[in-house]
Image: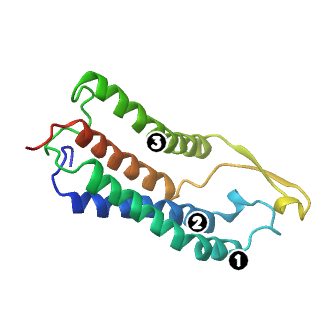
Amino acid sequence: MLKTSNNQVVYWLTGFAFMWCLLPAKLIDMAMAPAWFAPNPECTSSEMLDEALNGLLLPWTVLVALISAAVAFVLIRGRQSGAPVFKIDLGKPSKNIGVTLVMLVVVVPLLFDVVRYLWQIMVPQTVSSDCTGSADLVSAVMRRPALQVSPLVELTVAFWLLHIRALLLSKRVA
C-alpha cells in the first residue's frame, strides 16, 4: 500500500472509484448537514440534491472513467512497480520537479479542503444564505459537523495521486 503496484486495472478502478465518490460525497455532506450548507429554512430542499445528483451523475461518471483510464493505461503503462509512495527524490531531478509540480496543482486543493474542514469543525463560522436571492438573508454562527464524508474521500484521492506520481517517476520496464 505504501509502494506502487504494476496492476494498471487496479489503478484504473481505484482511481475511478475514489474520484467518482467526490461528487456523491459532497451531496451526502449536504444531506447530512443541511443547516450548515443552507442555514435558511426556505433553502433546505432535497429537490436541489436530487436534481444535482440526477443531472451531474452520468457526465461525472463518464469524465472520471475517462480520466482514470487515461492515467492508468496511458501515463503509467510500462512503469516499474515497488516505488515508495512518500519518497520525495524519485527519478531524475528535472522530471521529479515537473511531475511533482503538476501533482501539487491537483493535490493542494484537495488538501486545502481537508484543512478548511478541520478549521470549520474547530472554530465557529458565520454561515449565511438567501436562497440565491429568493429569500431573506439568514445568518447563523456554528461549527461544521464533525461527521462528513468528503474530507475522507479527498484524502483517498490525494493518496491515489501520490501513487500515480511515484509510478510516473519510476523507471520504465523494458
As rendered, which of 132 and 152 lies closer to the eye? 132
- Coordinates of residue 157 in the picture (x, y in percent): 39, 51
Above or below 26: residue 1: above
Q: Residues within 10 Å of mark 3 (few under 14, many from 20)?
A: some
As rendered, which of 57 and 76 lies closer to the eye? 76
* Residue found farthest to the left: 174
* Residue found farthest to the top: 93
13 lies left or right of 63: left
Q: Which residue is mark 3?
A: 106
Rendering quarter of residue 113: top right
Q: Secondary structure at mark 1?
A: helix
> Which label number is shown at residue 27?
2
Q: Residues within 10 Å of mark 1 (few under 14, many from 20)?
A: few
- Coordinates of residue 47 in the picture (x, y in percent): 70, 77
Q: Secondary structure at mark 2?
A: helix
Q: Which residue is mark 1?
A: 47
N-terminal label among 2 and 3: 2
Identified by mark 2, the residue type is: Leu
